[in-house]
Image (cartoon, rainbow, N blue to C red):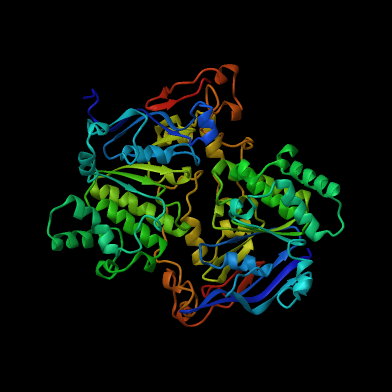
Amino acid sequence: MATILDIQHLTVHFPINIGTVQAVQDVSLSLRQGEVMGLVGESGCGKSTLGFSINRLLRPPGRIVQGKILYHDKDIVTMSERELLSIRGRKIAMIFQDPLTSLNPLFRIDQQFMETLFTHEKGISKKAAFKRAEMMLESLGISRERLMEYPHQMSGGMRQRIMIGMGLILNPDLLIADEPTTSLDVIVEAQFLDLLNELRKQFDLTIILITHNLGNVAQLADRITVMYGGTVMELGEANEIFENPLHPYTKGLLSSIPNIKLDQPKLKTMPGSPPDLVDPPPGCVFHPRCPFVKDICREQKPTPFTRDGHLVNCWLYG
Amino acid sequence: MRENVEDFLNITDLKKHFPLQKGFIDNLLSKEKSFVRAVDGVSFSIKKGEVLGLVGESGCGKTTTGRLILRLLEPTSGEIFYRGQSIFSHSKHEMERMREKMQIIFQDPYASLSPRMSIGKAIGHPLSIHHNSSRNEQRRMVLEIMEKVGLYPAEFFYKKYPHQLSGGQRQRAVIARALVSNPDFVVADEPIAMADVSVRAMLLELMVQLKEEFDLTYLYITHDLATCKYICDQVAIMYLGKIVEIGPLNDVFTNPVHPYTATLMEAVPVPDPKYRRIQPIPKGEIPSAINPPSGCRFHPRCHAAKPMCSEHEPDLIEVSQGHRVACFS
């Protein structure tokens, strides 16, 4: 399968007054055309920062200090702003956590759809743009009359669907969805994930699904990347990650999530809390919480170990 | 007094309608007042030492119910009996006294701790209201409860301010503050919703452990059915201000009778890539509580709706021991 996006040794820092937040440290991962990659981790693990870097949308003082992001073999990191404009939004779309703050409350939905089209497709007629917006609404399962409404007239689930529609109206091939269902209720969340799965086939999308909810990725993702403290802990096929997790962090994470279908009387817990990224622990970032810690873990960063496409960064392996 | 004295907390036909603000013109035209029927006739009881999970989507009235129980809100109608006493018959001052024994844990540990109060002071605050013990004595009690919730070394955390703590530690501080006055009933309003996955499991376990240790009774308010499994004895499912199903946890989970409960159970994300949903999720979202649908409030979204569902409101009917459902089918 063709590689659509190849991230190599990406490092992102946020210099602040008390030091430098090492938000993403030496992350490498590549995306195959048409797959859904689940990017999983707890708050502050760098998953959103990674997502934002792909479109170069990092807020200052955040900046990419090292590494490459190759999109169809072109490096986004070094690309000119002009060139980037032909990719950002048009080829790589992004949707965010909170649909209420991502939509402009002062404009009708049709106006917001058309603005996107006018900006990116020069010379498109008003009529054609409106038609496109109508068609998009249909694929989202929203009746076309609602195009004339304002965001406040819609429910949270509908707004999130509008957001994804705006992302997709330019026919991108990569969609970065940053916690798209966090602000939604369970039933609406399930509806949204179903829709995402449909749209994925309809638009032939590659998706990066950034989430802390392992239940969501289980339903949708083909492969999963587990992040912790700005680094990749483990990466592999979704089934592999769930059935045969290798990294102690992944194991801990999986056993601490409630599963309504399983008969487990008690959840396992992981002692400790995530690392301070201004001053991350030396060696493996997970070592202060790791139940299997060895001397080498405290001193040296683990080197990646790969078996059958299942990658793990841990000294227990290799 | 009521007949059934063994009930620890008893709620009968509780209602809370919030009036909607009207515009000037509407006032002139003296249009009819409209209300948000946040809680619309809720009854349940909790036995001593039990945990009741109150589950529902946003806007179903679960938080309002929790607040009414502590009388942080005044009800439109209905009664709440705590240990046989009606809490609405108390004066404001008496109610303050009651809150020594009835406490609440809020969802957001960032908003529920004053940024200008040290952790030790914040936790000790209820004591300075309810106790007239000496300062040293209060300090000792605060340090003791801090150790119990896992904020140790307690001396170290005592002087810290909220911004110096992680989210999980803050929530532990909030739990400590709720427990310091030695209550016997705690309303936990989404206590773990803001926390990260690994921290959630820890907080949940802490709550179970503290419940045993302090002989507590909880009302556990949540939108997450899956976590109920680890803490609740009973669950009540709320939809648009009404309880649609209530019963022992196992009965409701293994045999969800109300179509809404079944949908909710089905929608919970399952962390297993091999799992496929048995039934598709129905379309549509929770309607507005200003003009709730007539009859059974779930009927517009219900796959089993019959003509009578839109006309009559179903009552809670017992389907098995202690398991009651409000549905015609």
Quarter occupied by residue A187: top right
Q: Is residue A1 left or right of residue A16?
A: right
Q: Is residue B207 left or right of residue A168?
A: left
Count of marks, rendered view:
0
Quarter occupied by residue A138: top right
Q: Nearer the viewer, residue A167 or A17?
A: A17
Q: Nearer the viewer, residue B29 or B292?
A: B29
Residue drawn at the location 51% of the way across and 28% of the way down: B258
Q: Nearer the viewer, residue B77 or A107?
A: A107
Q: Nearer the viewer, residue A47 or A306?
A: A47
User: How far across and down, in percent of the image, does residue A232 sit?
Assistant: 58, 70
Residue drawn at the location 61% of the way across and 53% of the way down: A180
Residue drawn at the location 51% of the way across and 26% of the way down: B30
Quarter holding the N terminus of chain B?
top left
Viewer can see residue B22: yes
Quarter occupied by residue A32: bottom right
User: How far across and down, in percent of the image, does residue B218 sit?
Assistant: 32, 42
Viewer can see residue B52: no
Residue A30, placed above or below residue A187: below
User: How far across and down, in percent of the image, does residue A29 sit?
Assistant: 66, 69
Farthest residue in the front direction? B28
